[in-house]
């Protein structure tokens, strides 16, 4: 062998050894370094988890009446694996089936496709679960039809009928409760992607809104998992773990089914009343709470929808109606998401402000038709002059001009447009002590924050908007370039960060930039009624197992205390009582046997409706009762409802009639929702068969 | 005493054993690979075949028969002095080329996985002439480059050109099939033999350049069919084709990776039993080892190959016969690059081609060819002492 051959042989040897070492290195990487990752990947290839859903826990009211339960439905299901084996991929079977079930073939086709199989934009109705689960086409099949399908299995390969649990909102006592209860639906990819630490299983049914979502982790239970090991042809080769499902726990709420139903009716009637008086009355909200502990006894929003529609499967029409502006967005819960100017109901705040500013609450004040504030005249409601009166009377008849004067004087004392470095801000501070910008903390998703137009708000608003107003001519659309708006823009640019005189006087009567949710106003009036405690609002009371074991109790927190003296609150109690006996609320509550205290509010709203009409006033009535020993706060709001008293005031009276058991101005013994005068504290026995008590 | 031992020694030397002259390390390593391969072929097919109502030992039986035939071939190639093989080389080569021409004739050749590489025989048997052509090329080239018809101690350019013709004709026929994996292995062997033959270095350089250019041209023009290109593309981007070649490569990697250090145990791999990797008893058999035997078992397989190759290098160095040395070098290159291509493919280091794993994969032609190659190594080893 010559030198070159010898050398080349060595080179070849080194090369080949390196190749073998490279293989070993790569093998080490795949099996040891990346081994766990590949093991997971292999597991997902080989194993199929078949999830048998757990029975979802019930949602019951405070006396055990079920608000949400599970019903047995008859589901017609399609097995994708089986129909895909048909020569035509199951087209004929699905056509025959849709004819029999009186469904559209296109819907059946789409319902049986995995979402990934459909092109973008056509995914609505796709199956979010696994390919290996029978896919339900309908959950409420007629048993005769189901029998036909099972008997003619040769004509319906892969189609099966089986009883399944469906979530049902039974509507006992006429309860709708759509916004508060929520609904359930199949787990979607975005639920999985949320990564909120919850462990989900594909094809699980989970809460999608309302209490169903807040307490989902308790209600859902733990589904049973059967892991199957499959081969490339999807044949089962072995069985892995097999765990039985564990039923979900039950949610006991502080709601009362009968009261909830009555509140819903009273709200709908109030909307009708508003419309009968010529107002648009597009929507509304009402809430009843226990002012001693923050528990919500009834909560309603109008317009509403059928809570069972989701489980039945929304039609395209139903789905678009839910979010349709013309239908006033039934999906939106006004009671916790709607923001409205509180109007005269806010004068309770102004009373506390005036008291802390040193105004004599027992003195007499003049209530002229209008008050000059700087260069502008601010009118009384309907420009009526009431002459000289006590402050109490001024609350009762809802005089605005007294408040304009006090607010304007205080604004001037604080320095006007050039505020002192440490202004008194009596009005802002009184409002702040109600924790207005803090959420009420209710156990429902997506609560809106109320807004307080104080100095801090003005500053942050200016930071976000000064660019727009200072370059208004360039930034605004043609339609926005009216002389009035141009002038407004100029003002906003110059001193938009400052509280102007107009802002100050509007603040005192609950107009302007301050907006609150109906829940927030209920929380505020509850605080006035209970002597100053601001309670978190809660609907859930406890999580209970079927055997009665209490898993968890939910207790509302004290969020704050009003900074108002006892004298001020006493005065306010008297004034709010006089509203109902001799003031704006007297008509609505004429002859009512239980003493009620409250305040009307009629808020001006700017802007126009879709049909071009000017928006009508927001109608409010905020109250608590019984006045001598306050226990409940009731608030009703009708958007574009007109007068506070006639629309909402009467509505609140209806609610109190049910609550206290009043018929024809008489207390009927034993007819009250809570005959002991307070909501039950003991947790009820849970049974889907519990019936509400019938009033005598 | 000393007389007795001397006689015994004489007796031992004169006794003609069938293991006479066998390199023990080489033999044990190949024997272990054959044994492991048999278990892996069985594991790759047992579950699936019994699940679908077929004979679970169908492949096992055939594999054992293949090994038995292969061992007879080993015996045959070992007992005949390899130097006598030279006389038959033109016949081997001619038969190999004839086989490669026959697979291209419609009706005779059958297509498996896009390559027209097989001749169907009666009884469900098939032979793959390309496997045997590898041997013909190695022996033919070794002969031409070791025989001197002139005074020079080293092969001249003329010898190299002759050798290239001997390799080129079968190689072109294999390109037509197309079986790019085998072409790659043959090219590597050809360049290795020429490099070790002592031929002028410029030939090695030129051939390396030609090989690289050839690969580039083949992918750019239509010489490589869409099918082949697809396999190459999925090598570059495994997500490009989720059901075809890319699927196979990804499944292979997942299967091997899931084995971890010690594997799932023989016959216990869910990926293997579910047959998620196609061709897992033939070209993708290494995935079975990866999953069921883990890094220890599949690493052992690579180590055994390394051992075989190291012994073969030792044989190549020890022999004084240039023909034997070149033939050994050719067999080394063949085994090494076939192992690297096959395992590299399953590990995602090499593009996907259809070459079997020597001594392990199921398949008669490959088993026969690699065992003949083993026999040739032993033959050179046995005759290098005297």
Image (cartoon, coloured by chain):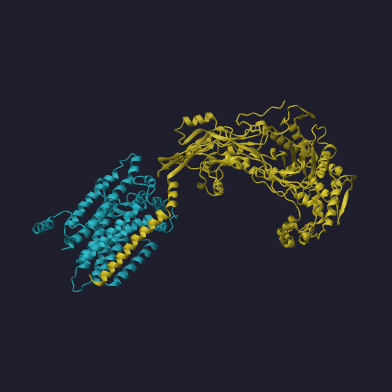
Chain colours: A yellow, B cyan
Give x and y (percent) for residue A271: 74, 39
From what the image shows, is residue B340 above or below residue A528? below
- Which residue lies most toward the bottom here? B151
Give x and y (percent) for residue B194: 27, 67
- Which residue lies most toward the left here? B3
> Would you say B239 lies left or right of B30 here?
right
Q: Quadrant of the C terminus of chain A?
A: top right
- Which residue lies most toward the right here? A387
Give x and y (percent) for residue A165: 55, 34
> Would you say A8 lies left or right of A608 here?
left
- Which residue lies most toward the top here? A696
Examine the image and state in which quarter residue A501 appears.
bottom right
One can see residue A565 in this view: yes
Question: In this view of the protein, which residue sits in the foreground, A63 or A345?
Answer: A63
One can see residue B164 in this view: no
Question: In this view of the protein, which residue sits in the foreground, B139 or A535?
Answer: A535
From what the image shows, is residue B87 above or below residue A331? below
Give x and y (percent) for residue A21: 35, 60
Q: Quadrant of the N terminus of chain A?
A: bottom left
> Would you say B277 lies left or right of A364 here?
left
Examine the image and state in which quarter residue A331 appears.
top right
């Amino acid at each position: 062998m010559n030198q070159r051959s010898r050398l080349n042989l060595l080179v070849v040897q080194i090369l080949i050894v390196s190749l073998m070492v490279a293989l070993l290195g790569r093998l080490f990487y795949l099996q040891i370094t990346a081994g766990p990752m590949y093991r997971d990947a292999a597991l997902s290839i080989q194993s199929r988890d078949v999830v048998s859903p757990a029975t979802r826990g019930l949602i019951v009211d405070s006396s055990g009446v079920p608000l949400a339960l599970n019903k047995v439905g008859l589901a017609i299901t399609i097995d994708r694996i089986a129909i895909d084996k048909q020569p035509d991929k199951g087209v004929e079977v699905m056509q025959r089936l849709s004819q029999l079930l009186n469904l559209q073939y296109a819907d059946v086709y789409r319902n049986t496709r995995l979402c990934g199989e459909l092109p973008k934009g056509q995914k609505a109705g796709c199956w979010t679960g696994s390919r290996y689960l029978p896919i339900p086409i309908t959950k409420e099949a007629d048993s005769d039809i189901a029998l036909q399908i099972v008997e003619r299995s040769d004509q319906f390969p892969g189609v099966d009928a089986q009883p399944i649990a469906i979530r049902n909102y039974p509507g006992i006592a006429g309860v709708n409760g759509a916004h508060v209860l929520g609904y359930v639906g199949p787990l979607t990819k975005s639920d999985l992607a949320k990564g909120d630490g919850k462990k989900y299983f594909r094809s699980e049914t989970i809460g999608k809104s309302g209490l169903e979502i807040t307490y989902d982790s308790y209600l859902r239970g733990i589904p049973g998992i059967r892991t199957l090991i499959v081969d490339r042809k999807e044949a089962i080769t072995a069985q892995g773990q097999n765990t039985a499902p564990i039923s979900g726990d039950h949610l006991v709420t502080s709601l009362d089914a009968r009261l909830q139903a009555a509140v819903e009716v009273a709200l709908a009637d109030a909307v009708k009343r508003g419309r009968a008086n010529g107002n648009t009355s597009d929507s509304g909200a009402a809430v009843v709470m226990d002012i001693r502990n923050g528990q919500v006894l009834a909560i309603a929003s109008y317009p509403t929808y059928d809570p069972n529609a989701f489980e039945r499967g929304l039609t395209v029409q139903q789905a678009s109606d839910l979010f349709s502006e013309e239908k006033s967005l039934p999906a939106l819960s006004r009671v916790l998401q709607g923001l409205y100017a509180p109007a005269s109901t806010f004068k309770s705040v102004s009373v506390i402000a005036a008291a802390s500013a040193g105004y004599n609450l027992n003195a007499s004040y003049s209530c002229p038709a209008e008050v000059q504030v700087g260069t502008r005249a601010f009118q009384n409601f309907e420009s009526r002059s009431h002459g000289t009166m006590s402050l109490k009377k001024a609350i009762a008849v809802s005089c605005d001009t007294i408040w304009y004067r006090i607010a304007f004087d205080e604004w001037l004392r604080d320095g006007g447009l050039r505020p002192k470095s440490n202004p008194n801000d009596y009005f802002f501070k009184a409002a702040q002590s109600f924790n207005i910008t803090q959420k009420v903390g209710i156990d429902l998703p997506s609560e809106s924050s109320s807004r307080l137009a104080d100095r801090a708000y003005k500053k942050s608003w200016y930071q976000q908007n000064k660019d727009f107003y200072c370059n208004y001519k360039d930034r605004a659309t043609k339609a926005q370039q009216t002389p009035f708006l141009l002038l407004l823009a100029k003002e906003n640019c110059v001193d938009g960060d400052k509280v102007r005189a107009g802002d100050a006087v509007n603040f005192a009567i609950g107009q302007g930039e301050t907006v609150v949710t109906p829940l927030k106003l209920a929380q505020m009036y509850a605080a006035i009624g209970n002597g100053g405690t601001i309670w978190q609002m809660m609907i859930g009371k406890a999580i209970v197992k079927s055997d009665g074991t209490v898993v968890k109790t939910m207790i509302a927190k004290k969020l704050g205390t009003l900074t108002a003296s006892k004298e001020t609150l006493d005065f306010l109690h008297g004034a709010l009582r006089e509203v109902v006996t001799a003031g704006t609320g007297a008509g609505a509550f004429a002859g009512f046997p239980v003493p009620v205290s409250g305040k009307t509010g009629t808020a001006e709203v700017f802007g126009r409706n879709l049909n071009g009409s000017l928006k009508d006033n927001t109608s409010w009535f905020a109250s608590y009762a019984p006045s001598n020993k306050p226990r409940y706060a009731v608030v009703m709001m009708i958007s574009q409802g007109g007068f506070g008293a006639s629309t909402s005031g009467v509505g609140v009276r209806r609610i109190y009639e049910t609550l206290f058991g009043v018929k024809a101005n008489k207390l009927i013994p034993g007819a009250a929702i809570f005959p002991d005068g307070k909501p039950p504290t003991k947790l009820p026995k849970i049974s889907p068969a519990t019936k509400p008590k019938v009033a005598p | 005493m000393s007389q007795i031992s001397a006689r015994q020694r004489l007796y031992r030397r004169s006794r003609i054993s069938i293991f006479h002259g066998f390199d023990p390390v080489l033999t044990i390593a190949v024997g272990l690979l054959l044994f492991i391969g048999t278990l892996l072929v069985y594991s790759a097919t047992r579950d699936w075949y019994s699940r679908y109502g077929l004979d679970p030992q169908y492949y096992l039986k055939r594999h054992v028969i293949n090994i038995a035939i292969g061992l007879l071939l080993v015996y045959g190639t070992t007992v005949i002095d390899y130097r006598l093989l030279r006389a038959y080389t033109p016949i081997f080569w001619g038969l190999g080329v004839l086989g490669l021409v026959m697979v291209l004739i419609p009706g005779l050749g059958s297509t498996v996985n896009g390559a027209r590489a097989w001749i169907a025989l009666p009884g469900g048997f098939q032979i793959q002439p390309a496997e045997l052509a590898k041997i013909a090329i190695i022996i033919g080239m070794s002969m031409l480059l070791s025989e001197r018809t002139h005074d020079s101690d080293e092969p001249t350019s003329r010898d190299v050109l002759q050798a290239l013709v001997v390799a080129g004709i079968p190689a072109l026929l294999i390109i037509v099939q197309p079986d790019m994996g085998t072409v790659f292995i043959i090219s590597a062997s050809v360049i290795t033999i020429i490099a070790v033959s002592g031929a002028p270095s410029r030939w090695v350089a030129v051939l390396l350049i030609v090989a690289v250019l050839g690969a580039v041209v083949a992918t750019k023009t239509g010489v490589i069919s869409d099918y082949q290109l697809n396999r190459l593309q999925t090598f570059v981007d495994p997500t490009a084709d989720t059901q075809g070649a890319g699927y196979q490569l990804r499944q292979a990697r997942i299967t091997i990776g899931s084995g971890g250090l010690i594997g799932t145990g023989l016959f216990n791999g869910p990926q293997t039993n579910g047959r998620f990797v196609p061709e897992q008893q033939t070209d993708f058999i290494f995935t079975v080892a990866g999953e069921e035997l883990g890094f220890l078992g599949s690493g052992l397989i690579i180590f055994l190959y390394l051992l075989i190759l190291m012994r073969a290098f030792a044989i190549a160095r020890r022999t004084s016969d240039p023909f034997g040395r070149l033939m050994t070098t050719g067999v080394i290159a063949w085994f090494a690059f076939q192992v690297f291509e096959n395992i590299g493919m399953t590990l995602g280091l090499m593009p996907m081609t259809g070459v079997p794993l020597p001594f392990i994969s199921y398949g008669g032609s490959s088993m026969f060819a690699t065992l003949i190659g083993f026999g040739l190594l032993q033959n050179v080893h046995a005759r290098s002492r005297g």
